């Protein structure tokens, strides 16, 4: 049981003492605020985009347990990206600071700054990170469903032999880059990469990690190599067990072992476009300004595959409760939807009025106001109706459902829960204790509140 004692030290700083297994609520020196913006002039083909996201989730489920990938659909379709609003925050001296190496940001009150973008092909969070000497900026896709860090290497090619359309790293761009002959290959829901390991300096805001060992990609799947893909590389926050890179450690552990963050923890508040509010990622701690303390539940990660997997108590749809203690959920920021076995999807949608099935996906009325919730650790977490209805097109009455069927031979007990759920919770991942902390979101997140901590 956690007992939290809060006392205000000043108007801008809160002191927190935790007794008995404290939550690591720390100074947010590594907190990254972000906001949504949608480029309506580049509206995508939503039906293709939706099916691509479903397929992405199915492939990630297959990869989770080493199953063969399901048939690929729309893997080479170009879906435009969503652009991020710039956010800038200054330190107490009035000097601009960067968090996750941001640039060209608008002024805001606060402590650190970053510029993040939302990438709409697979839905992810992009932070600007600097690597090498001199420092070179890279757009990194933040992914809790993988554990590796990689960027394209000089001379990178697509599988069809074309030049990779993103920034690269190597001896010609960094005089501190060191290469090795250690080979790696990684398969994602969106494609594959291969290459060799390397070492260089990595800078994330005030954090500078020297001699970090990470992947440098020499060949990418055609889809990943497209210029329309707005990220250069991937920054994984999955457990070390799912790393495919030899003789290295995930970035979160590397930062922790170097003494740069107080705990090997990453926390997410994922934004919702329709709310026009901030989201954020915090390294090394939780930011309690983003969640309700009395709703916190900490769960042991139950999976043996290296993913962030937790037990589901039950699932509720419009008053009907189902799947009591029958399911576990892989929590993945890199997946848009909730992917469940077909028989589970059928039962869930049977309790959603007006739902239809076209043989592949479910559709629901766009104006549905269903009460859908998931229980974890004895606490109920509601899913906003807006996250259940994905627009087919403007003016249409039918939307794709935020819950999709997926059958890849894992059995009936495992679900993949992406942003349909995660936009409704605060999630923190702790590599030290192998735990997942979930909490209900604070409603007013217009300004972050920053904390210092003492543990007794």
Image: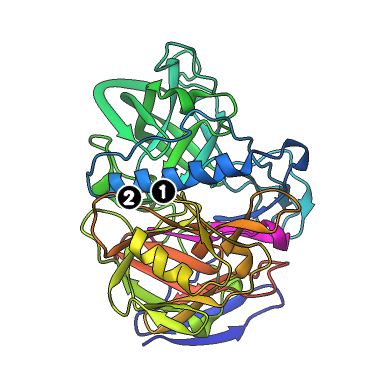
Answer with the quarter of the image where residue 348 lies.
Answer: bottom left
Q: Is residue 290 left or right of residue 68?
A: right
Picture quadrant where residue 264 is located: bottom left
| Mark 2 Cα-neighbour bin, 10 Å: few <14, some 14–19, many ≥20 | many
Q: Residues within 10 Å of mark 1 (few under 14, many from 20)?
A: many
Q: Which residue is mark 1?
A: 57
Marks 1 and 2, how far apart at CA: 6 Å
Applied colour scheme: rainbow
Residue 188 part of the magenta segment: no
Out of 43 and 11, give the one closest to the viewer.
43
Q: Which residue is mark 2?
A: 61
Q: What residue is shown at x 59% (from left), y 41% (from top)?
A: 101
Residue 180 location (% of width, % of height): 28, 21
Q: Quadrant of the N terminus?
A: bottom left
Point out residue 105 in the picture as x, y percentages from the top left corner: 74, 44
Q: Residue at the location (23% across, 44% down)?
A: 67
- Front in this rendered view, residue 146 or 369: 369
Which secondary structure lies at badge 2? Answer: helix
- Image location (x, y in percent) of residue 335: 46, 51
What residue span does the magenta drawing correspond to? 263-281
Asked whether residue 274 is drawn in magenta, I would say: yes
- CB atoms at circles 1 and 2 under 8 Å apart? yes
């Amino acid at each position: 049981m956690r007992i939290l004692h809060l006392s205000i030290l000043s108007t801008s700083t809160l002191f927190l003492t935790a007794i008995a297994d404290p939550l690591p609520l720390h100074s947010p020196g590594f907190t990254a605020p972000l906001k949504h913006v949608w480029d309506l002039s580049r509206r995508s083909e939503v039906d293709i985009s939706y099916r691509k996201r479903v397929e992405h989730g199915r492939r990630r489920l297959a990869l989770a347990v080493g199953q063969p990938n399901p048939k690929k659909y729309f893997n080479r379709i170009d879906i435009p990206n969503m652009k991020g609003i710039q956010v800038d925050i200054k330190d107490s001296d009035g000097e601009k600071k960067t968090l996750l190496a941001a640039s060209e940001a608008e002024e805001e009150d606060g402590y650190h700054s970053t510029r993040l973008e939302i990438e709409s092909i697979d839905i992810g969070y992009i932070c600007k990170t600097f690597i090498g000497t001199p420092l070179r900026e890279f757009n990194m896709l933040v992914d809790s469903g993988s554990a590796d860090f990689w960027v394209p290497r000089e001379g990178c090619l697509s599988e069809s032999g074309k030049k990779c359309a993103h920034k690269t790293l190597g001896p010609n761009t960094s005089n501190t880059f060191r290469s090795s002959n250690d080979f790696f290959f990684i398969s994602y829901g969106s494609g594959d990469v291969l290459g060799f390991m390397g070492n260089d300096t990595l800078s994330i805001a005030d954090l500078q990690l020297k001699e970090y060992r990470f992947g440098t990609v020499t060949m990418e799947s055609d889809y990943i190599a497209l210029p329309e893909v707005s990220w250069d590389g991937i920054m994984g926050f999955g457990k070390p067990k799912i790393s495919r890179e030899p003789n290295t450690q995930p970035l979160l552990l590397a930062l922790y072992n170097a003494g740069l963050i107080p705990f090997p923890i990453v926390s997410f508040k994922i934004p919702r476009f329709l709310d026009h509010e901030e989201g954020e990622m915090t390294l090394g701690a939780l930011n309690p300004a983003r969640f309700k303390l009395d709703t916190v539940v900490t769960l042991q990660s139950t999976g043996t595959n290296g993913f962030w997997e937790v037990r589901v108590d039950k699932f509720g749809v419009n008053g009907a409760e189902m799947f009591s203690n029958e399911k576990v959920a892989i929590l993945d920021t890199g997946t848009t939807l909730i992917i469940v076995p077909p028989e589970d999807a059928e039962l869930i949608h049977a309790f959603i009025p007006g739902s239809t099935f076209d043989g592949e996906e479910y559709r629901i009325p766009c104006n549905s106001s269903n009460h859908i919730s998931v229980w974890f650790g004895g606490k109920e977490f509601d899913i906003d109706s807006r996250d259940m209805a994905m627009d087919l097109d403007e003016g249409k009455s039918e939307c794709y459902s935020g819950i999709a069927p997926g059958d890849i031979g894992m059995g009936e007990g495992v679900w993949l829960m992406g942003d349909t759920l995660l936009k409704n919770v605060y999630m923190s991942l702790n590599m030290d204790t192998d735990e997942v902390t979930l909490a209900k979101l604070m409603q007013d997140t217009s300004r972050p509140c920053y904390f210092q901590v003492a543990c007794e």
